Image (spheres, rainbow, N blue to C red):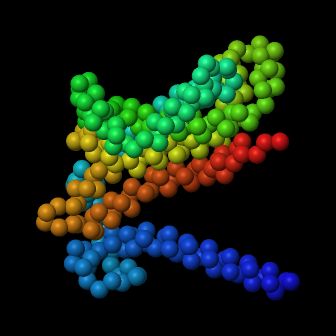
Amino acid sequence: MTRRRTFKEVMVYVIVILLAIIILFPIYWMFLTSLKTKTEVYSAPNFVPTKFYFKNYTEPFFNGEMGGYLLNSVLISSFNALLVLALAIPATYAFSRFKVYGAKHIFFWMITNRMAPPAAFLLPMFLIFSALHLLDTHIALVLVYCGFNLPFAVWLLKGMIDNIPRELDDAALIDGCSMWGVLGRVIIPLSKPGIAVTGLLTWLFSWNHYLFAFMLTNTNARTITTGLAEYVTVMGINWGQMAAVSMVTMFPAFILVSFAQKYIVSGLTFGAVKE
């Protein structure tokens, strides 16, 4: 029995290691490519870096426009996450605690907006922001991303707030809290893990989005994801700098996930089990 259990544990570790290699190898290969010159990229492949060509990292950000694109991505993603949370938390509180007429239909309609392909909204959004003279602005992308991320945030937070006992609301009301006081002193503190996960996922969705950023921006509000397309030209593809910029685009998300890691598991499982 012990040998069989040991064999199963070994097989589990082997499978996990193989999956990790499969998932991480593309990232490792991109890192290797980012350290090569244009000539070395097309030479015989090597799996261990022999030279470090750091110009692929310095030139796009210090001599190119990628630094501005990176700043645009950080600002747009951060403001979008804050706006989505500011709207999603009271909206979810209303869905969860109040008897809203047609709440199920409204909730379903919001989710269907998130299910729709972004391309279906591309032309209307372009015409609206063009009429408002908001093309190539940070505000345009923040509002567009908010429209797509808000239904997801409400859906994610609703299960978490539903799991908070209503008796805590009644106790706070008896102690003199208003409805806003209950939201600020009871609901939000108890939903911190879920709010953190919702903000993180919202931020990542905005950070990685390409289509709207490509169509609604040109120079001033262009993001780092659309900036990567500049390395694909009729003269060829600059694989070294493209790989280097791609590695840099991963750092902010990696840092954010590292800080929010303690909330991720508790936030995703919060409200999953009810008595």
Q: Would residue 68 be visible to someone looking at this image?
A: no
Q: Give x and y (percent) for residue 133.
A: 23, 26
Q: Residue at x 63, y 50 (%)?
A: 264
Question: Residue visible at 27% across and 36% down?
Answer: 123
Picture quadrant of residue 167: top right
- Image height of 125 relative to 271, above or below: above
Query: Which residue is at 63% across, 20% downward?
Result: 100
Whether 2 is drawn above or below 226: the answer is below
Would residue 143 be found to the left or right of residue 187 on screen? left
Where residue 251 appears, as percent x and y from the top left, is 44, 56
> Where residue 238 appears, x then y in whole percent?
23, 66
Q: Quarter of the image containing the N terminus? A: bottom right
Q: Residue at x 43, y 57 (%)?
A: 250
- Residue that sits furthest to the left in the current view: 235
Is residue 25 visible in the rendered image? The answer is yes
How far across and how far down the image is residue 258, in percent? 56, 54
